[in-house]
Image (cartoon, helix red, strand yellow):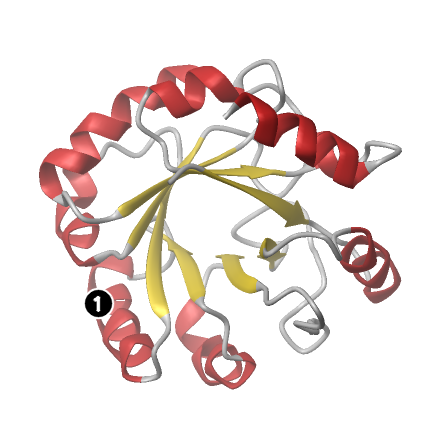
Amino acid sequence: MKKIVPTITASNPEEYAFQLARLNFASRIHIDITDGIFAPSRTVNLNQIYWDHGEVLKQIDLHLMIQKPLDWLNQVISLAPDLVVLHAESENATENLPRIADHLHKFGIKFGLAILPDTTVENVAELVKIADHVLIFGGHLGYQGGVADLSQLAKVNQIRAINPTAEIAWDGGANLENIPEILSAGVEVVNVGSAIMKNSDPEKYYQEIMKII
């Protein structure tokens, strides 16, 4: 089933609260966390985020664009998200990410692997094999908005050949105009940031996207 997932990218707690409230209609939310090192921008940190499932039972995906995810593992587990997406380009990823994935699974948390544009699928094949979710990054790291690099869609079939069961996601520059192409390439989950968040009526825009899929 194809899924559209609104994204929160907030630089401070006030902005986070505002964006979270605007997405009260969504059943799945993607939350970006950056450390100002791995990604040039800095968002709220893991000590500043929260969510309330409320009337709509939400699935929470945490996308950690951080250099040393191992340092934050206990905090991540205490938040109990459904999915944690970590970067193949983070520090000592080949050694650390399998250990992190195994630990997350013990707590019922899925492990996602994000791949930046300059990283080839072949070079991170061993990490792709163990991922529950593989995110193809085709945007501007740590920021909402920008133009989607649709050439990255070539990675879909490469990922599928290595891990047939992984959920494949897209992040970066998705909007009404390019989402059909992204989905037709085999992507199952499209994370949508500024196109939804900066719209005057986020829920209406979300519903417009849902009509085309």
Name the residue carrying label 1.
Answer: 98
Q: Is residue 118 left or right of residue 80?
A: left
Depth check, front residue: 63 or 88: 63
Residue at 73% of width from left, 74% of height from top?
A: 48
Question: Badge 1: few (under 14), some or many (20 or more) residues near its Cα, within 10 Å?
Answer: some
User: Disc 1 marks which amino acid?
Assistant: Pro
Q: Is residue 50 left or right of residue 135?
A: right
Q: Does residue 36 show up?
A: yes
Quarter of the rendering containing residue 116 = top left
What x and y, as percent, mark residue 133? 32, 51
Depth check, front residue: 30 or 97: 30
Q: Is residue 103 above or below residue 63?
A: below
Residue at 66% of width from left, 68% of height from top?
A: 45
Q: Is residue 206 left or right of residue 57?
A: right
Residue at 68% of width from left, 26% of height from top?
A: 208
What x and y, as percent, mark residue 176? 62, 20
Q: Is residue 108 above or below residue 175?
A: below
Quarter of the rendering containing residue 158 = top left
What x and y, as percent, mark residue 180? 48, 18
What x and y, as percent, mark residue 207? 68, 33
- Number of labels in the image equals 1
Q: Does residue 145 show up?
A: no
Depth check, front residue: 33 or 31: 31
Query: Quadrant where the N terminus lies?
Result: top left
- Judged from the image, the secondary structure of the residue bearing numbered disc 1 is helix
Q: Is residue 152 above or below residue 100?
A: above
